[in-house]
Image (tube, grey):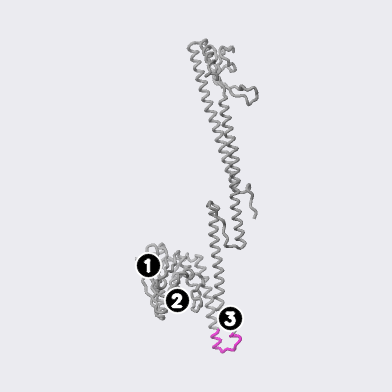
Amino acid sequence: MKLPNSFSSISFKLSALYLALFLCSFLSIGITVYWLTQQSLETQLKNTIETEANRLKTEFDADGIIELRNEIAEVSDRDSHTLFEYGVIDQNGLLLAGKLDTFKLFDGWQLIMRPSDSKAPEKSNRYLYYIRVIELPNHVWLSVGHDGKLLQTAGDAVIKAFTGGFILVIFLGTCGGFYISRTFLRKIESITKSTQTIIEGDLSHRLPVSNWHDELDNLALLLNLMLDKISSLIENIQQVSTDIAHDLRTPISHLKLRLENAINKSLSPKQYSEQITFAIEELDSILATFSALLRISQIESGSRRSSFKSFNFSNIVIAVKEALLPIAEEQNKTIQLDIEKSLVLMGDKELLTQLIFNLLDNAIIHTPKKTQINMTLCSSGTHTELIITDNGPGIADAYHQKVFQRFYRLEQSRSTSGNGLGLSIVLAITELHEGTLTLTDNKPGLKIIVSIPTRTSHLIT
């Protein structure tokens, strides 16, 4: 699988999009700062010129044109006022005071372009000149001017700063986008290679997870959990296939041998009947095994939840005990009950009946004579618990989980009846009802606890 290059990857495209949005925001901020700076400095400059012009007008109003001329001549010689230029012109255009005569005869603000002190007359060496013109009595015009070099210098500084920042943002954003896309592609490449390894048959391989714990790592963790589950299911299927072949080989071989003997040997009608009866029994055993497997699959699918109803669980426990009591008494075994009356449970009545039957039947079959079996049913407030204990040989801790595997039997000789699916069915039924199934040591014997959440049960008063 060919991976895209860094510039065509989705991560780089997203980085480029965010960079473009950021540059637009950066440009908008730059234009705003430039405009506000120019406006603020222009306002300050105009206020300064306005103040000076009003001061000279006041001087004229008090002492006339001669005193105004003297004041302009005096302030023009001061160092602190060298940036101001003054001009007084009569109605005929005659300059009466100062040197500024490049203004039009109307009251208000005037802007003109003037060359800088530089000898080069290029356009870049020209600047705005701010002039405040005030009309005095007798058609005399007073002007006060100041250059706008400060505004232009400040504006140029803002433009240079934001231009440099703009270029720096583009550079860093491009490098960052390239780095992020390369990092993203490296992760995708490692995930792709791992996936190809798994596709080629190495189901034990897992996707790499870094220490960053980002979105890709979280996705890899979830995929690894899914692969663990798939691997477990495949192993279970393989194990079940092996167990089916192993468990069915013996009855099928016996069946084949009996049928061959029936064909090859001359038998009496009674002997033929015995062979047919044996064949039917073997076929019943095989069909029972397949029925149990199908039942487990049906239970694990969860389809039986739709048939959940409320029923008296206490009565079911009593009924199963009464049904199996004669078998227990034949082997000199006792069954004691300690149950809460009228305990109602929400669930599948048929399946829970089979759960109790399988557990109690196992306790009877796999314990020696004179074993005492106790059944307890109670509600703890948070769970409804069915507890079955015996004082038999029990099961070693190492086998507590194995006995729930399909076809697993502690008795390797398999001399007793059964197919090793009883506890697998019990576990599937318990999980269908969102309960838990626990095996513990009863010291001596075995203790089995089936616990179902309280939300599905209640007591009838």
Residue identified by numbered label 2: 366
**From the image, which quarter does the N terminus lie in?**
bottom right
- Spot occupied by residue 192 in the image (x, y as percentages of width and height): 61, 56
Q: Which mark is residue 378?
A: 1
Q: Secondary structure at mark 1?
A: strand
Callout 1, which amino acid?
Cys
Q: CA distance from mark 1 to mark 3?
A: 50 Å
Residue identified by numbered label 3: 256
Q: Residues within 10 Å of mark 2 (few under 14, many from 20)?
A: some
**From the image, which quarter does the C terminus lie in?**
bottom left
Prevailing SS of the magenta stretch: helix
**Vertical position of residue 30 compared to residue 184: above or below:** above
Picture residue at 57% right of the left edge, 41% below the top: 21
**Label 3 vs label 2, nearer the camera:** 2
Picture residue at 37% right of the left edge, 74% below the top: 336
Picture residue at 59% right of the left edge, 37% below the top: 166
**Vertical position of residue 181 compared to residue 451: above or below:** above
- Spot occupied by residue 337 in the image (x, y as percentages of width and height): 37, 73
N-term-proximal mark, 2 vs 1 = 2
Q: Secondary structure at mark 3?
A: helix
Callout 3, which amino acid?
Lys
Q: Is residue 424 visible?
A: no
93 or 149, which lies in front? Answer: 149
Which image quarter: residue 276? bottom right
Left-right relation of 81 to 363: right
**Label 2 vs label 1, nearer the camera:** 2
Q: Secondary structure at mark 2?
A: loop
Callout 2, which amino acid?
His
Cβ atoms at labels 3 and 2 below 8 Å apart:
no
